[in-house]
Structure formats: structure tokens, C-alpha cells
Amino acid sequence: MCGIVGYIGFRPAAPVLFEGLKQLEYRGYDSYGIATHSNEIFIHKKKGKVSEFSPDETTLPGTCGIGHTRWATHGIPSDLNAHPHTDCNEQIAVVHNGIIENYAHLKRELRAKGHTFRSETDTEVIPHLLEDLNEGDLLKAIQKMVNYLEGSYAVLAISNDCNRLIAVKNRSPLVLGIGDGEFFAASDITPLLEYTNRVLYLEDGDIAEISVDGYEIYQGSTQVSRRVHEIQWAPETVQKGGFPHFMLKEIYEQPEVINRAIHSLTPDSIPRFLYDAKSMTVVACGSSYHAGLIFRYLAESACGIPVRVEFGSEFKYNSVPLTDVIIGISQSGETADTLSAIHKGNCSNVQTVAITNVLNSSITRYADNTILMQAGPEISVAATKSFTAQLGVLLQMISLLSGQVSDEFLSHAGVSIDKVFLLNLDDAVSLCAKAEHIFFVGRGPFYPVMMEGALKMKEISYIHAESYAAGEIKHGPFSLLSPETPVIATCLPGPAYAVMLGNLKEMKARGTPIIAIGSEEDTELSELADVLIPLEEKHIFLEIVAVTVILQLLAYHTAALLGREIDKPRNLAKSVTVE
């Protein structure tokens, strides 16, 4: 859950590394550092955000180097715990994303041999282990080292005795950028876009030795080749483009994104075994889990297929019988818990499908079939357009499997989002910003929609937000209702409308302020609610998409009013690559 970047070529390395770390800061931002090589190793690292670095920090010499932006796992954020880490004599420097599971055992052994450790991190065992194994050839030392490490790791290493960069991958993402007389390595492609669109994705067990003259990739001591891909993303897609935050920019990209996602799945491209499935299991985490829950409600109703939805973090330890198909949803394609679930399905000869945003990510290599949702790069930690793209793919899947392709949905999804952008949410935002606690309630498929809304609110505004199926709130949570505890509710025409309206009247009787999302023609709801957010959509698919975007904007504007750091909320990272 950290970001790493490496460079070797003809440019001064330090500025390239710092700019690359800025692009990766969504992966971790409690500390940062770089190391460069020019006859000796030069290191600069400190606690804090790389986006706040001063220009004189880029003056380290050399045209080869490595950098790191940290999301702490072992040890508090501090200058000492920041990467890069070195061996005893500062002849080897490394940066690392992942977790070394057996680091405590290795650390005891290395200390017994006289090695001195400076940090609390698991990563520091790597340079000391390399020092112990190094006989003058860093590549050979690394080829030996991987036999000692247990866990997940993407590692970049440099040493004082050679102008080379070594990259190692195991269960953590690592991509190489191929330029003209220069080469890059990074946790994802965003830092590379300014310099090259040619990349290759390292596979688990790969060790790459990179110099200004080229690169060689090994599995153990055997040389292997990896295909070079051309990336279509343009450099401006990772810029704010005049918006105050990436999150708002990405929300406004959603009309185009959802239309692209819908058309990513066609009658010819949908995996054929899905048509024959008697049951399905969706495995996901965070926002992707909520998308899976929405899929469950709608797929069971429209297709008659039983659907289980499981947290990726629990599925590995779940002993219930596996279903016909496992669908793993992961924006990054590197979510460790979801990868474990796909692997479990493969080991049990269950058909697996990956829904992801990243071509050649780990999940695409694990799963039998992949559906790319084509959302484009998402920089803000809080998922917005990636979640909407997941909805587009899943709702299109339901349309195809049910045999009732929704032309209305296909043609109007983007328009429905555009209409949301015209709504005035000021009164709702003002009410939310004054609250310490907010309840989000809904029924049917709108219950998981409200779960996603509550997650967005707590992620970026730091207001405590909880979601409930509306009928359940009187089974305990009613005790928390008060005039200081707003309820945000979806109450749209449909089978549950009358009972949902009754639930809201019960809440209102406790003095609770109500923010209702409902039909613009609903006078009874308008009279009941303190704030009515009107919705004119009549198709449930369009309603779900529109409500999702309303809740994203409500969370965004509340956080902005409170002065929160929206794109980089505290304690969170974008891609959760550790279990």
C-alpha cells in the first residue's frame, strides 16, 4: 500500500523521482524519500507528504535512483522509518511495497550476525540480507535473497558498486516503463505517462536488471521475456484539469465513464459460462463490495440466479460450498484479499471472472476471464468513477443475462448523471456539515447504494456515518436518533415506497432531520423532509446511478465545506495490496 518509483537514464534522477512520487502519493503519504547513485549513494527522506517537498530537495546527484511514498504498516511515520533503507555501510539502498511476513525471524538472525537496524520497519531486513548475501554482484545477491523472503513485495534496489537498478516482484504490483535511452519502474503506470507509453508488467517471481543499455528479466537464474504494451492513457488524464480536487474531476468524468463501461460488455464478449451459471459468488472489498451487493439484489430479481456476496478479507477463511462462478471485483486489480479469493476458486476448479480497471493487473492473470471497466486512471483515494464503472458493467451483465437489454439504460445513463450536476445540494450539505453522526437508509438495492454513500461521507469528511436497511433502524439504532442526527434516505416510487415512507415518519417523530432523495412530484415526501433532493428518473438502473452520484457530491461538498484534505484522506491508501 506504498508507492515506489525508479529511474535510470540520461536525466537527473531526483526530479524524475519526486515528480513520480507525487503521482503515486494516493498510495501512501505519511513519509517519503529517494536515493540516487553517483559514485556513492545519496539519500533524502523525511516524514510528511511528498507534495509538500521544497525544490532544493531535488538536487541529489546522479542519473539513477529509487523513491518511495509510505503508508505505514510497521512502525510509526517518522524520518527513520521512511524509505529508502540501507545496509550497515550504506552501500545498498532499497524501497519496498508490501509486507515481509517473516521479517522478525530474519531480523533476529541478522542481528546475531552483527547487523545493526535503525528503523522499526519490516523492509529494513532486505538491505541487510542483501549485504549478507552480496559477493560483489547485486543481481546474484537478489536472486538468492528471494528464497529467504515470505510475503508480498515489490522491491527496487541500487548499490554503490554499479550503475544498475534491480526490480523484484512478488504479489505486489510493479511495472517497467521503456523509454529512449531511459527506463522507469513504478507501482503503476501513472508516473510513466509523461515519459513513455511503452510498458511491461512484471510477473510474480520476476527479477529485472536495468541499465542505460537495456534490461533483462529473470525467473530465478533463467532469463525470460515479457510483452511490451502500448498504453492509451494520455498524460493529462492524471492532471486536475482546473478542478480543485481529483475527486471532483473524477465525479464529473462519470457520464463518459459509465457509457464506456456499459459498452465494454457485449453479447459477444460476455463469458459464455455465465449464461449457464446456477449460482454466483461476488467477492470484493470496500466500494467494490457495495457494487456486488447492488448486483445481488438486481440479478436475483431479473435473472433468478442466487448470488452470494462476500468480503474478500473473509472469503479465504470461509468454508461454505463454492458456487458455479466467482466474480472478483477490484478497481486496481491488486487487492490482496480479492486475489486470494480468485486463487481459492481456481484451486477448486470454479470458473472465475475478474472485473477491474487495470489491464494486466494481477487479477487479470489469476482469473479465467476478465472484464475491463475502462474508467481510466483514478487518483483520488475515494472511489467515484471506478464505482460507477463497476455499476455500468454489472448492470449491463444483468441486462444480457436476463435477455432484457435495457435500451433506456444504455442510452440515458450518462444523461442521468448530467442531470444530477444541475441539482442544488447546498441545504443538504449545510445540514450534514453541522452533524457529528449521520444515518443513511434505504430499502432493496438502495440499501447498498446508501452503504456506499455512508462510506464516502466517512472517508473524506470524517463524519461518523452508518447505513441501515430502513426497516432495521428501529431494532436498536433508533436509540441514537436525535435532532442532531440527520438521516439521508432514498424514498422512490416502487414496491417498498409505502413502508419506506412509514419508516421516515417514525424517524421524523423522534425529531430527526430528514434529507430525502425522492420523486420531484412526491408532495407527501416533500412535506415530510427537511430537504428534498428531487429525482426525475423512472427506471431503477438510472435511479441507482443518479442516487450514487448525488451521494458522492454530497460527501464531496460536505468535506470541502469542512476544509478536509479530500483526495488524500487520513490513514487511507488507494490500493490495498496487503491482507
Image: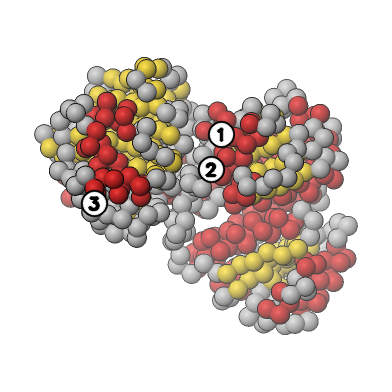
Q: Do callouts 2 and 3 mark residues in contact (Cβ within 8 Å)?
A: no
Residue drawn 36% across and 36% down?
Answer: 148
Q: CA distance from mark 2 to mark 1?
A: 8 Å
Residue 260, quarter of the rendered image: top right
Q: CA distance from mark 2 to mark 3?
A: 31 Å
Q: Do callouts 1 and 3 mark residues in contact (Cβ within 8 Å)?
A: no
The three-letter code of the residue at mark 3 reads: Phe
Residue 168, quarter of the rendered image: top left
Which residue, given by chain and number where applicable, does mark 1 sit on?
363
Mark 2 or mark 3, earlier in chain: 3
Q: Identify the secondary structure beneath mark 2.
A: loop
Q: Identify the secondary structure beneath mark 3.
A: loop
Which residue, given by chain and number where applicable, does mark 3 sit on?
117
Name the spot of residue 558 as percent of width and height, x first: 55, 66
Which residue, given by chain and number where applicable, does mark 2 sit on?
335
Residue drawn 37% across and 54% down?
Answer: 74
